Structure formats: structure tokens, C-alpha cells
Amino acid sequence: MNGIITIATKHALYGRYAYNLAVSVRATNPSTPISIIADEIGISHLNESQRAIFDQIIAPRLEDYCNGE
């Protein structure tokens, strides 16, 4: 199965960009699964109906941000 995964972390505009991408994908292929890896900041400008465009919202793990320091 093919799908789209995008990332929106540490800045609210990234969530907006991911949402715009998802709207474009849905317009051309409504059955394509779309997931987003996002922290609360990344999707803070999206309301519940906008968040619903994503099939899955995945919270990143803290260790994904760390480089061992």
C-alpha cells in the first residue's frame, strides 16, 4: 500500500504546510492514506476538522529530537 507521510514539528506553519499538502492529495486521490508526525506546536494552528484530514497523527518521541548530548 502506498501513502503519504509528512512531518510538522517545532513550528506551527509546518502544520499548515502539511495540511495544504493533504488537501491537494485528497483532491487528486481521495483514497491515499496520509499520516503526519507532529508535536502539539506543529499542529497548533489546525482546528479539529483540519486535523481530521490526516488518517493518523503520530506524536514524535523525545529521543527523535536528541543527538545524544
Image: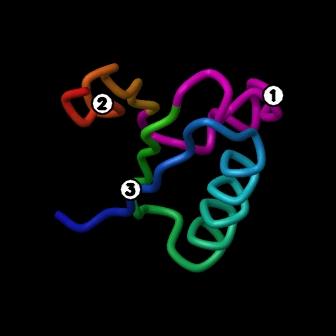
Say left or right for 44 vs 59.
Answer: right
**Displayed quadrant of residue 60:** top left
5 vs 62: above or below: below
Say left or right for 61 vs 27.
Answer: left
Q: Amino acid at mark 2?
A: Cys
Q: Which is nearer the N-term, disc 2 or disc 1?
A: 1
Q: Secondary structure at mark 3?
A: strand
What residue is drawn where x is 45% and y is 40%? 55
Q: Which residue is mark 1?
A: 47
Alpha carbon distance from label 3 to label 1 = 19 Å
The part of the chain drawn in magenta is: 39-56
Number of numbered markers: 3
- Pinpoint residue 41: horizontal percent, then vertical percent: 68, 27
Q: Which mark is residue 66?
A: 2
Of residues 55 and 68, the one drawn nearer to the viewer in this rendering: 68
5 vs 49: above or below: below
Q: Which residue is mark 3?
A: 5
Q: Which is nearer the N-term, disc 3 or disc 1?
A: 3
Q: Amino acid at mark 3?
A: Ile
Alpha carbon distance from label 3 to label 2 = 21 Å
Q: Dot 1: few (<14), some (14–19), or many (≥20) neighbours within 10 Å?
A: few
Magenta stretch containing residue 1, yes or no?
Answer: no
| Most common SS among magenta residues | loop
**Displayed quadrant of residue 9:** top right
- Pinpoint residue 68: horizontal percent, then vertical percent: 19, 29
